[in-house]
Image (spheres, rainbow, N blue to C red):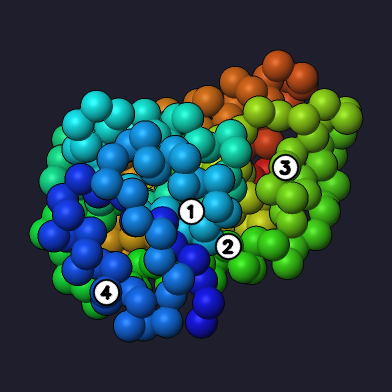
Amino acid sequence: MGYKILLADDDRDLLEMLGRYFEMKGYQILQAGNGTEAVRMSAEEPDLILLDINMPGMDGLEVCRKIRGQVSCPILFLTARVEEQDRVNGLMLGGDDYIIKPFSLKELEARVLAHLRREERHQQKTRYRFGNGLLVDYGARAVWIDGKMLDLTKTEFGILEFLSMHPGQVFDKERIYEHVCGFDGQGDGRGITELIRRIRKKIGEFTDEDPIETVWGVGYRWKK
């Protein structure tokens, strides 16, 4: 398979178990026992990062904040936290998914593979020009309005990408979360409203026309 995964967790037993499991499945494994090591090893261009939130010193959220500008690969948080604000914070920083401890190795591997395959599909897409000067480059995962690039996080782009590829279709928050963040049928829409508000604010810096329409009581759609 050849995918390279960075595992970051201060629980050495869990780190070694995950390392052995994924190596047995044919993955290349990088291991970091703390946040500082995770930041340093992210420079080795992993295809995906499994990142524990509850690490002492530099926690997983801070690691994500530091590296997201340099890495575009999926970042999946491993956490025992279930509070809504933790999920929102992780998404705002550019995380892609949450895996709640304890978890089954089969479910974890399925989530990992789903994100890796989704990332490969993203890289094969091309540019598409919408009205009002808006250009989406699905391959480069970038958006421009009248030649000016929007500063979108990975998750914000994922939402814009998903909606823009299905113009006119209405999706509720849970469906958007499922498709963008990979919960594979167990979508959790908490945080989507805030993320769409942030996308609109960034678009609004360059144009007064909002391409995302709110369908009250239902969800959101990309205007045709």
Mark sitting earlier along the chain (3/4): 4
Residue 34 appears anywhere in the view: yes
**Amino acid type, callout 2:** Glu
Percent position (x, y) of residue 171?
47, 52
Residue at screen point 77% across, 21% down: 207
Mark sitting earlier along the chain (2/4): 4
Residue at the spot of label 1? 74
Residue at the spot of label 4? 20
Residue at the spot of label 3? 142
Is mark 1 in CB contact (under 8 Å) with mark 4?
Answer: no
Per the model, the C-alpha gap separating discs 3 and 2 is 14 Å
**Amino acid type, callout 4:** Arg
Residue 219 appears anywhere in the view: no
Mark sitting earlier along the chain (1/4): 4
**Amino acid type, callout 1:** Pro
- Decide which of 37, 96 is in the foreground and name it: 37
Per the model, the C-alpha gap separating discs 2 and 4 is 24 Å
Percent position (x, y) of residue 188?
29, 49
Residue at screen point 68% across, 20% down: 204
